[in-house]
């Protein structure tokens, strides 16, 4: 059972649903009368993106991109690569980057820099989770679901070595699963 690898549940399905709705209300207020373009950073944010976009009652388009920075470990390397670029042009659009978790900030500072060079009307960042203790690169954050302590979490899209994404809640992975302390 996947659940046996979880030390503690941090956010239940219901808590996630409620928080996603709150973020959607904030975005609706900030972008009233505008069209937004949500960019999901694959793969961790796919579930958050699916729930968030359905909660936002604004005209909205979606696109996806994929970057690699992790390999199979639990810390980011600082070496970021675009492995799948956007399909759409973002010039003149109001872009919201949708991420699962902001950790060291390596991935997002790199990504936001690239997107800003493409001349969108605006770019904001929306992350479900924020782990500020581990920040190495400063990143401006507009929408954050929950601030979490420095622990490795999985579920609701977040993985360890590609597993646990399908857990409906977010939980702390038992350190013995990844050989941590
Ligand atoms: P950063 O470049 O260190 O900010 O890493 C961001 C990416 O690392 C996220 O998009 C996640 O894919 C992954 N990540 C960071 N912390 C965790 C975690 O606790 N669980 C699962 N993935 C994580
Ligand atoms: Mg990610």
Image (cartoon, rainbow, N blue to C red):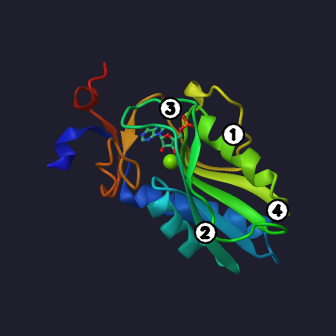
Dot placed on the residue nearer the N-terminal end, 3 or 4: 3
Q: Residue at x 65, y 78 (%)?
A: 57
Horizontal side, residue 1 vs residue 107: left or right: left
Which secondary structure lies at badge 4? loop
Q: Are marks 4 and 2 in contact (CB under 8 Å)?
A: no
The furthest residue to the top: 181
Which secondary structure lies at badge 2? strand
Q: Nearer the viewer, residue 30 or 80?
A: 80
Dot placed on the residue nearer the N-terminal end, 1 or 3: 3
Q: Residue at x 76, y 66 (%)?
A: 90
Return the x and y of residue 27 as percentages of the image width and height. 70, 64
Q: Circle 4 is placed at which residue position?
A: 120
Q: Is mark 1 within 8 Å of ligand 1?
A: no
CA gap between label 4 and label 2 equals 14 Å
Up-down relation of residue 6 to residue 2 (above or below): above
Dot placed on the residue nearer the N-terminal end, 2 or 1: 2
Q: Circle 2 is placed at which residue position?
A: 63
Q: Residues within 10 Å of mark 4 (few under 14, many from 20)?
A: some
Return the x and y of residue 136 as percentages of the image width and height. 63, 25
CA gap between label 3 and label 2 equals 24 Å
CA gap between label 4 and label 1 equals 16 Å
Which secondary structure lies at badge 3? loop
Return the x and y of residue 36 as percentages of the image width and height. 73, 71
Return the x and y of residue 83 as percentages of the image width and height. 53, 52
Q: Is mark 3 within 8 Å of ligand 1?
A: yes
Up-down relation of residue 143 to residue 93 (above or below): above
Which secondary structure lies at badge 1? helix
Labelled disc at residue 109: 1
Q: Circle 3 is placed at which residue position?
A: 76
Q: Residue at x 41, y 37 (%)?
A: 71
């Amino acid at each position: 059972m996947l659940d046996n690898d979880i030390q503690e549940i941090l956010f239940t399905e219901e808590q996630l649903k409620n928080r996603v709705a709150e973020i959607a209300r904030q975005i609706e207020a900030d972008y009233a009368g505008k069209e937004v373009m949500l960019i999901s950073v694959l793969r961790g944010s796919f579930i958050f993106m699916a729930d968030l976009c359905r909660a936002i009652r604004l005209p909205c388009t979606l696109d996806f991109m994929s970057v690699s920075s992790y390999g199979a470990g639990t810390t980011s390397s600082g070496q970021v690569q675009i492995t799948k670029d956007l399909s759409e042009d973002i010039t003149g659009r109001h872009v919201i980057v949708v991420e699962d978790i902001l950790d060291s900030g390596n991935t997002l500072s790199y990504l936001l820099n690239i997107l800003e060079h493409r001349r969108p009307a605006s770019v904001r960042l929306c992350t479900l989770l924020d782990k500020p203790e581990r920040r190495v690169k400063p990143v401006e954050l507009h929408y954050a679901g929950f601030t979490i302590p420095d622990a490795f979490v999985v579920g609701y899209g977040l993985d360890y070595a590609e597993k646990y994404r399908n857990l409906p809640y977010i939980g702390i992975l038992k350190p013995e699963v990844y050989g941590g302390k």
